[in-house]
Image (cartoon, rainbow, N blue to C red):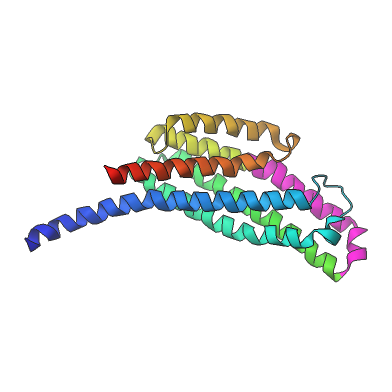
Amino acid sequence: MSSAEDVMKPGATLTSTRLRAPRAAAIAGILFSILLIISFLLLRLAVPADPLEAGAWLKTNVNTVALALNLVPFAGIAFLWFIGVLRDRLGEREDRFFATVFLGSGLLFLAMLFFSAAMVGGIIIAYKAGADRLLDSATFTFARAITFEIMNIYAIKMAGVFMIATSTLGLRTGFIARWITFFGYAVALLLLFSSRYIEGILLVFPLWVFLISIHILIDNFHGLEE
């Protein structure tokens, strides 16, 4: 009996690992979505969308902005985990071309997100060091404009490319439902061609990741029942 149990153990371990991987991806995706949505909403409530505003939010809403910025690193960690577990789930079915675009666009989006958060954090530190000098300087206008451009043009487009690559991999390998892949293509095109013209459009990206994560989680539970 012991020899039979030993033979069955590797297979049982492999099955357990395969079941845990989708769960890990789903949980990481949900955490990323929730944290990033909260961060975006806090920033939108505290900071005017106009990149040329005078910086009044530094006098009244700096604590809200600081809270939003503190959530960004944790959202980034969850997003990295989400990408890693999805790649692990794809395994040998992974298309090298789209997998490269998938990984590259995800990392670029994350780098731009972190850079923008660091720029806003730098503005807060500079304001505390010398409020009057900062608000009347070209440095403040430049930092606000750079942050606005990165998030509302370049980061949005990288999010769109990530969605297209993920949807294509999902369509070819079947690791997500077909309707989610087609929905991903539609939303990705919206991100690629709308950019700054629709306020808050970047919220679509974490909502889409949340949708994929919930789908993976439900699909995993169905696999456990079977």
> Residue 9 appears at what percent x and percent y?
18, 58
The answer to if 186 sits in the magenta stretch is: no
- Report the quarter where the C terminus lies: top left
What is the total number of numbered labels drawn onto the structure image?
0
Given the current orientation, which residue lies at the most extreme front position? 225
State whether residue 197 is above or below residue 68: above
**Residue 57 quadrant:** bottom right
Give the overall secondary structure of the magenta segment.
Answer: helix
> Residue 158 appears at what percent x and percent y?
61, 42
Given the current orientation, which residue lies at the most extreme left position? 1
Q: Residue at x 64, y 35 (%)?
A: 191
Residue 82 visible: yes
> Residue 120 appears at what percent x and percent y?
75, 58
> Residue 30 appears at what percent x and percent y?
51, 49
The range drawn in magenta is: 130-157
Is 91 placed left or right of 33 in the picture?
A: left
Residue 147 visible: no
State whether residue 199 is above or below residue 76: above
Q: Residue at x 70, y 41 (%)?
A: 200
**Residue 134 quadrant:** bottom right
State whether residue 105 is above or below residue 173: below
Q: Residue at x 40, y 50 (%)?
A: 23
- Report the quarter where the N terminus lies: bottom left
The answer to if 153 sits in the magenta stretch is: yes
Is 6 placed left or right of 25 in the picture?
A: left
